[in-house]
Each structure stands twice: as C-alpha cells, then as structure tokens.
Amino acid sequence: MSLTLEQKKAVVAEVSEIAKTAHSAVAAEYRGLTVGQMTALRAQARSGGVYLRVVKNTLAKRAVEGTDFECMSEGFLGPLLLAFSQEDPGSAARVVKAFAKDHDKLVVKLVSIGGQLLEASDIDRLAKLPTREQALSMLMATMRAPLDKFARTLNEVPGKMVRTVAAIRDQKQSAA
C-alpha cells in the first residue's frame, strides 16, 4: 500500500526534525530480517535512545536535505533503515553493531557524524565513543587529577617530618 502525499510529507517532516537534532546516523540494509527480528531491533533502539525508521529512499533524501546528514543521500540505495543517535554520538552505532553481531542479514552501508560520511567499517570507532556520562566522568577525573596530586604533595611534607622524627627517636633508643 503506497502512502498518500500527506503521509509522505509527514514522514519527511518527522525524519527531517530528528535529523536536525541528531548527533550521528547509521544506514543499514535490512534485507532478509524477519518481522520479529525488526521488532527486537526497534525495541533495542528505543531503549538505547536511538530513532530507528525504515523510509523509502526518495523520502529519506528529501528528509536529510539541509542537515548534517545530506552527505548520505547518494548512498541511499536498496532497502535501508535509518538510525539516528539522539542522546550521544555513538548510541546508534552501538545498537546497530550489537544487533548485527547476532544477525548477519543486517549490513551497515553508511555512517555519518558531524556532516562527514565515514566508511561503513568505521562503525566500530563510532560505537566506541563514550556516552555523555562517561565523557563527563573522564573530564572530571582529568580536572581533579592536579588537585589530588597537589594535596598528596602537601601531605607529604608533614609525613616526611614525622618519619624523620621517628627515625631519630628510634636511633636514640637503640643507642641508649
């Protein structure tokens, strides 16, 4: 059943709004996946903060016009699903990569981040990007490290004095 013009406009508008705010996108060929497998993939995507949608290629090309993902439009060939990362740049790549590990019918075709089209093999690099919480904790650890080192250095001065006094005491007791 084909979509009416109004339905097509609604699909383009919805995907375009998501693409404008998304951090990264992954397009994968889903030929050969069963309905149950697609439902499982959609559930994983929802829980991972990923917008996942199967869109006709002509509508997808219109939807990504004027967004960072316009570079992907030349590669929209065959049955593709689009996954957009909503929360952090690596979330779509993590969901698609994890699902493709168990289902070889899901084949990554396009990967894009920050307006750059990457090789499909770069999904591993994108999937390894830290989540927002991980990035914040790494930043906080980096900012805190000099303070921790300064505190240890300051604490070492009285500690060294105590060890020196204890060594002198021990020396006097052994001499007596």
Image (tube, helix red, strand yellow):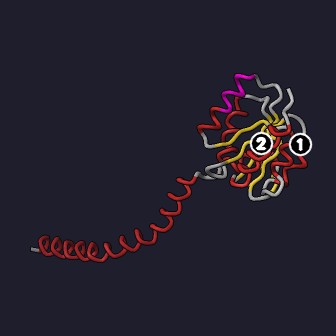
Residue at (45% x, 67% y) in the render: 144
**Relative to 87, is 5 above or below?**
above
> Mainly helix, strand or loop, the magenta region?
helix
Q: Residue furthest left?
A: 176
Residue type of the residue flagged with mark 2: Ala
Q: Earlier in the sequence, mark 1 or mark 2?
A: 2
Percent coordinates x, y for residue 59 in the rendering: 85, 43
Percent coordinates x, y for residue 4 in the rendering: 85, 34
* Crowd around label 2: few <14 · some 14–19 · many ≥20 (10 Å): few
Quick one: SS at disc 2?
helix
Q: Is residue 20 magenta?
A: no
Q: Quadrant of residue 114?
A: bottom right
Percent coordinates x, y for residue 43 in the rendering: 63, 32
Q: CA distance from mark 1 to mark 2?
A: 14 Å
Image quarter (top left, top right, bottom left or bottom right) of the N terminus: top right
The one nearer the camera, 141 or 82, is 82
Quick one: SS at disc 1?
helix
Residue 125 visible in rendering? no
- Disc number for residue 58: 1
Q: Nearer the viewer, mark 1 or mark 2?
A: 2
Q: Which residues are magenta?
A: 35-42
The residue indicated by pointer 2 is: 10
* Crowd around label 1: few <14 · some 14–19 · many ≥20 (10 Å): few
Residue type of the residue flagged with mark 1: Thr
Q: Quadrant of residue 176?
A: bottom left
Residue at (81% x, 39% y) in the render: 6
Q: Quadrant of residue 78?
A: top right
Count of numbered badges drawn on the protein: 2
**Relative to 119, is 173 above or below?**
below
From the viewer's perspective, tell me whether residue 162 is left or right of residue 41. Answer: left
From the viewer's perspective, tell me whether residue 43 is left or right of residue 154. Answer: right
Percent coordinates x, y for residue 77 in the rendering: 90, 40
